[in-house]
Amino acid sequence: MRKYTGILIFFLVAACANSQRPARILPHYDLSRPEIFSMPDQLREISGFVILPGSNDSVLAEQDEEGKVYYFKLGDKKPAQIKFGAKGDFEDIALCENTVYLLRSDGQLFSFPLPQTRTGMVKDVKIWNGLPQGEYEGIFADQKNKKLYVLCKHCAGEKSNRTGGGSVFAIQHDAGITPAGNFRIDIREIEKLSATKKIDFHPSAISRHPSTGEWFILSAVNGMLVVADADWKIKDVYPLSKAVFNQPEGIAFDSLNNLYISNEGGVGAGNILKFAYKK
């Protein structure tokens, strides 16, 4: 009897040890110690933002209720605002060369010339409706290969084939876009690495590390940051503390590899968190 009792205790201890997944530490970034930039009232519901190339502190942002873009430097109290369209559920913003791209939750894409932001009113707005039916929250413009990546939050087939992903577009010289394929995110790998069974993965933002080419995929609903390699193979999953990340909806990098994540405010103010890159 003692023999079987000893075996049982061994397996129980082993099971407990395996169930406690070691805390993951994101290489080069301390996700527990951000520099916090509180947003003004206009950006309480900040949904997406982008760091202007070469500036490392100048931001273009949008919130999810009005057809406006806000320009400011981190720490500014009164951002400049630019109206580009009617009210709508806008979720993210991207920038490629001199063109601004905005994503509405229904998949409608808007674009306009960046220089027109200096006038306070955008006139030359283009609208594109070619995305598959679904709910969208993330967009990223790759300056190097001139491609636009649009991430789907809820799309057909996710539950049956356990994959997420989105669409890729080539950016033309006239700032137009043409379909250039799609990408897939293996939800089963996210489940394995997060030790979660049958996860409903609903990403809210996407960006690409400027030095490594890795994809950083943010999910507010799941409270996690997923990192994939350049070919979309999932490398690791990092849980996000609710104390730091109230409602993470936007993600970006600057040219110095610093990481930024925005939180919608809810009851309090929205913010942008800066995580300094450490070699």
Image: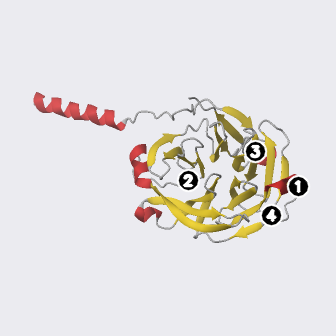
Residue displayed at 71% across by 63% down: 173
* Residue wearing tag 1: 120
In the image, 29: left or right of 44?
left
Q: Secondary structure at mark 4?
A: loop
Residues marked 1 and 2 touching at CB (< 8 Å): no
Looking at the rendered structure, the kind of residue marked 4 is: Gly
Asked if the residue under mark 1 is in contact with the one under mark 3, i.e. CB atoms within 8 Å, the reply is no
Q: Between disc 4 and disc 3, whose residue precedes?
A: 3
Quarter of the image where the N terminus is located: top left
- Mark 2 or mark 3, which is nearer the start of the sequence? 3
Pick whichever, 92 or 167, lies toward us: 167
Q: Residue drawn at (85%, 42%), measured in percent from left and top? A: 78
Q: Are marks 1 and 4 in contact (CB under 8 Å)?
A: no
Q: Which callout, 1 or 2, points to the residue nearer the camera?
A: 1
Residue under pointer 4? 85
Residue in the picture at 56% in, 50% down = 221
For marks 3 and 1, the one nearer the N-term is 3
Query: Along the polypeptide, which appears first: circle 1 or circle 2?
Result: 1
How far apart in space, not on screen, are marks 4 and 2 (Cα)? 25 Å
Q: Where does label 2 land, which residue?
A: 203
